[in-house]
Amino acid sequence: MDTRFLQSFIYVVETGSIAAAARRLDLTPASVAQRIKALETDVGSQLIVRAGRTVKPTLAGNRILQHAHTVLNEVRDLRSVASETSLPAGPLRLGATPTGLTQILPGVLKQWVLAHAHIEIYIEPAPSTVLYQRLLNGHLDAAVMVHPLFDLPKSCAWHGLRKEPLTLVTPSTMLVSDPIKTLATEPFIRYDRQVVAGKLADDYLRHHGVRPRVRFELDGIESIGKLVAEGLGISVLPDWNVGGPPDFAIKRWALPPPHMEREVGIVWTRAGVRAQLAQTLVALAAPLFKLESVTGPS
């Protein structure tokens, strides 16, 4: 059985479309359809069926789906173990949040290329909640993400890189003498409460009895920062732009106690075949980010 056919089947199920799966695989839809047909012949059952404009797995297709994931993971593990160097072979499947991808990984990856250019890293951007689930499901080996508001299972290892305090973010032209009063009176752009920093911000506002005048709610720190820069409102965000270029269209203001912060770091599965690759990545990142609370704005 050709494992490429299994991967094609998984992509068809995930996307609900042969054409969409073909785009992910950089193949023609006809080639993907041929792969699915060959796989169906091999297993002796129809695996997908058209339902309107989408494609769905049949009963047999649903039954083999998890096994297909398992087979592909085991084949990938086999290839990693078959290494003639001190490290497992790649690729290291690394997840990263959007801010982790832009604020943390560039310097770390530069060190990686200098030390281990022969080992490929596949990077998957996604929110922390998605990355955590994909790590637990075995689809990722490690992830740069925000520590959740609960203890990680013992099967996972964590290395913190930095802590980011919540700050009040306003247009640069706005003067703030009382952050709490400003939060209570100005139009507010809420950071999605489904993510860690959004929950922390909501808890902070509740602690101070503030019911903000919410104009928008969305995920994406950079996106919220751009809306604030356009004068569409203020927000409470983690101090994410550490070490990056200053944004002169916005200004950050320290918030009165209680001080809340999110922790960003690298998580990986202890028993994974490529755990040593994740540990090597951490060793490169640790000198660049010494887990210290970022000094907030004054």
Image (cartoon, rainbow, N blue to C red):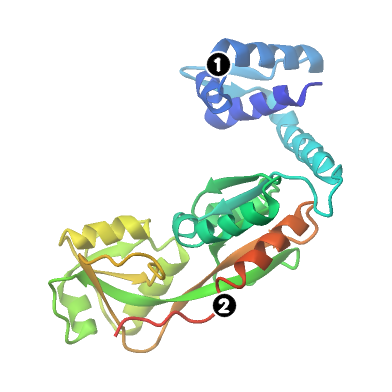
Quick check: can you spot residue 213? no
What amino acid is at disc 1? Answer: Arg
Residue 242 appears left or right of 292:
left
**24 displayed left or right of 99:** right
Mark 2 crowdedness (10 Å alpha carbons): few <14, some 14-19, many ≥20? few
Where residue 105 sits in the image (x, y, percent)? Answer: 53, 58
Residue 138 screen position, x and y as percent: 71, 48
Which residue position is annotated with label 1?
A: 50
Whether residue 138 is visible, yes or no, is: yes
Tell me the quarter of the image containing the N terminus.
top right
Q: Within 10 angstroms of label 1, few (less than 14), some, or many (20 or more) residues?
A: few
208 left or right of 62 in image: left
From this viewpoint, which residue is outermost toward the bottom? 257
In this view, the residue farthest toward the front is 114
In the image, 76 versus 18, the foreground residue is 76
Q: How many marks?
A: 2
**Of residues 184 and 7, which is closer to you in this image?**
7
Which dot marks residue 70?
A: none
Report the disc number at residue 290: 2
